[in-house]
């Protein structure tokens, strides 16, 4: 990436420190400035360091589908780690369970359990692009998970959002290349 050395240095520092701190990184900026490319580079660099990368992308036309972003994240989990136990709430989110839709708190607990299972096997990076287009239920769950994991060292969370609508930002970003 030409001309993005400062942002790439911040991403490298984030990836180096995230194994200890579990802190989030929020990439902000106007449309078309290369946030998605930076996120992809961060994911590639994380994978190169041996981190498991779970990715999802919010898409405007899918914003009404409950838990669409979580289904993306979970698809890569179940494909690569068949021994990971999803639990009833996440199974229902994927459309494979019977009964009523689970409450957001149960889904968040289920996702935390899966992420802890994965992080017991090695570092994990969540890379979520265009969070402003995630469905409200999925954004709520990812927000709960991000707040509970921030600073634990259990999980590395990288998230990216356009300025404006974003329910994943519980407070100001610790490092925000723009």
Image: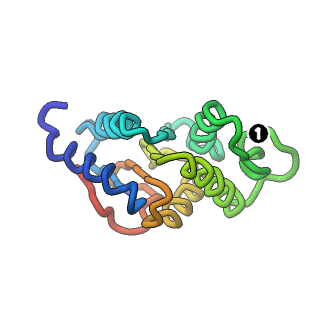
Q: Residue at x 61, y 57 (%)?
A: 112
> Callout 1 environment at 10 Å: few (<14), some (14 to 19), or many (20+)?
few
Image coordinates for residue 25, horizontal then vertical, percent: 35, 54
Q: Residue at x 61, y 38 (%)?
A: 77
Q: How many marks?
A: 1
Q: Residue at x 56, y 46 (%)?
A: 121
The N terminus - image quarter: top left
Please identify the quarter of the rendering in which residue 94 is found.
Answer: top right
Query: What coloring was used for the rendering?
Result: rainbow
Q: Secondary structure at mark 1?
A: loop
Image coordinates for residue 140, horizontal then vertical, percent: 57, 59
From the viewer's perspective, is 148 left or right of 33?
right
Q: Judge by depth and name the residue closer to the eye, 28 or 52.
A: 52
From the viewer's perspective, is 135 left or right of 92?
left
Q: Residue at x 22, y 43 (%)?
A: 8
Q: Can you name the residue that lies furthest to the right here? A: 99
Residue 148 in the image: above or below residue 141: below
Q: Judge by depth and name the residue closer to the eye, 82 or 63.
A: 82
Image coordinates for residue 85, horizontal then vertical, percent: 73, 46
From the viewer's perspective, is 159 left or right of 9?
right
Residue labelled with disc 1: 95
Is residue 137 something one can see in this rendering? Answer: no
Residue 139 in the image: above or below residue 174: above
Residue 82 in the image: above or below residue 132: above
Image coordinates for residue 101, horizontal then vertical, percent: 78, 52
Q: Judge by depth and name the residue closer to the eye, 120 or 159.
A: 120
Residue 46 in the image: above or below residue 154: above
Q: Can you name the residue that lies furthest to the front here? A: 121
Q: Can you name the residue that lies furthest to the left here? A: 3
Is residue 62 something one can see in this rendering? Answer: yes
């Amino acid at each position: 990436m030409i001309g993005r050395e400062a942002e790439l240095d911040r991403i490298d520092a984030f990836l180096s420190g995230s194994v200890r701190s579990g802190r989030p990184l929020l990439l902000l900026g106007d449309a078309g400035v290369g946030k998605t490319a930076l996120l992809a580079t961060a994911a590639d660099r994380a994978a190169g360091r041996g981190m498991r990368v779970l990715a999802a992308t919010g898409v405007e036309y899918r914003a009404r589908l409950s838990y669409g972003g979580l289904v993306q994240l979970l698809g890569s989990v179940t494909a690569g780690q068949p021994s990971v136990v999803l639990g009833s709430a996440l199974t229902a989110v994927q459309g494979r369970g019977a009964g009523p839709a689970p409450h957001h708190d149960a889904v968040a607990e289920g996702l935390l359990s899966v992420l802890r299972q994965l992080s017991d096997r090695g570092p994990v990076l969540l890379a979520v692009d265009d969070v402003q287009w995630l469905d409200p239920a999925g954004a709520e769950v990812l927000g709960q998970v991000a707040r509970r994991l921030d600073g634990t060292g259990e999980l590395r969370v990288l998230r990216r959002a356009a300025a404006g609508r974003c329910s994943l930002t519980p407070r100001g970003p610790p490092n925000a290349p723009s």
